[in-house]
Amino acid sequence: MIEEEEFEEQFLSLWGNKDYESLKELVKDYLDRPDIVNQSNYAMWTDYTDNMNYAIHIKRGNQASIDIFEDLLDYFIKKLEPEYGHIHKGHILWTLSSLWGPLNVDKAKNYLEKA
């Protein structure tokens, strides 16, 4: 389990090096902790996903952000929830709705309804 300080160092390094695939995997590893996915710590991980989205969206575009957030949603559903129980995914769903909005209104609406 990665500690907060080590995570922040690695996050900033990967972000600075534009290694977005490794950044996504680092965030997923970081999320795989009961103290992080706990509803009371929601703001802790959403800041990192927002920063990751911003970096990826600016450098690689909307579809790259969609791909990463859909992968993150899948990770929550298939990996984290079976282990920890229900986890609030509203932030991920809201982000996906916002990203899909200009491309496909039906998909955006679907994600928004799930949020």
Image: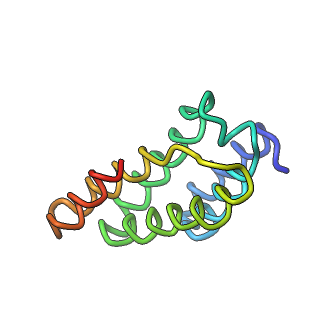
Q: What colour-coding does the image apply?
A: rainbow
The answer to which image quadrant residue 75 occupies is bottom right
- At horizontal 75% and vertical 42% (from top left) the residue drawn is 34
- At horizontal 59% and vertical 63% (from top left) the residue drawn is 24
Question: Tag count in the figure?
Answer: 0
Q: Is residue 42 left or right of residue 100?
A: right
- At horizontal 65% and vertical 42% (from top left) the residue drawn is 37
Location of residue 85 with respect to 69 vertically, above or below: above
Q: Is residue 90 left or right of residue 17?
A: left
Q: Position of residue 92 (x, y in %)?
A: 43, 51
- At horizontal 48% and vertical 48% (from top left) the residue drawn is 89
Kindly give the residue lying farthest to the top in the view shown.
Answer: 40
Q: Position of residue 43 (x, y in %)?
A: 54, 32
The answer to which image quadrant residue 20 occupies is bottom right
Q: Using the image as rendered, state which of residue 49 and residue 60 is in the foreground.
A: 49
Q: Position of residue 40 (x, y in %)?
A: 61, 27
Q: Position of residue 1 (x, y in %)?
A: 85, 50
Q: Is residue 111 left or right of residue 14?
A: left
